[in-house]
Amino acid sequence: MELGEGCLEQLSGRHAPETVDAALKAAFARARSQYGWQPGPDMGSGTLVLEKNNWTATVALPGTPAQGLQAPVGVSLVCVDADSAGAPSATGTPGRSAVGPS
């Protein structure tokens, strides 16, 4: 399996630390229910993973930031080059709205 050309996206931002975990879990739940994403492999309790076609979205739930700072959030979107893996080609991309705020 190889990463396809242009198959890596990094999305980042900051969120209120009191609600960041709940917001990320709600966004991933919305991606499953409204956009057809499926649960990905279990990478532990501090990581959320979704898959759709040849795309995988991963986010580590942030720890507690220093007092007075917002929690940093980073979501990685990675695709596997379907041609090199021998898998069927996926149509389109997963779309940024699938894991972003509604």
Image (cartoon, rainbow, N blue to C red):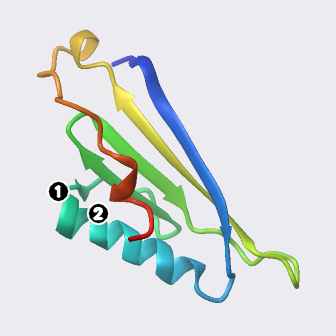
Residue 51 place in picture, x, y as percent:
28, 48
Left or right: 10 as drawn, with respect to 3: right
Question: Label 1 sits on what residue type?
Answer: Gly
Badge 1 marks a residue whose secondary structure is loop
Left or right: 74 as drawn, with respect to 32: right
Query: Which quarter of the figure has residue 63?
Result: bottom right
Left or right: 8 as drawn, with respect to 70: left
The N terminus lies in which quarter of the figure? Answer: top left
Residue 43 sits above or below residue 71 on the image: above
Query: Which quarter of the figure has residue 64?
Result: bottom right
- Which disc is residue 50 wearing? none
Residue 9 place in picture, x, y as percent:
51, 37
The C terminus lies in which quarter of the figure? Answer: bottom left
- Which disc is residue 31 wearing? 2
Q: Residue at x 24, y 16 (%)?
A: 85
Query: Which quarter of the figure has residue 36?
Result: bottom left
Residue 97 place in picture, x, y as percent:
37, 56
Question: Label 2 sits on what residue type?
Answer: Ala
Badge 2 marks a residue whose secondary structure is helix
Instruction: Give the residue number, with chain letter if any, for mark 1.
Output: 36
Residue 88 sits above or below residue 9 on the image: above
Left or right: 91 as drawn, with respect to 75: left
The reply to whether residue 21 is visible in this rendering is yes
Residue 38 sits above or below residue 14 on the image: above
Q: Residue at x 53, y 68 (%)?
A: 46
The reply to whether residue 41 is visible in this rendering is no
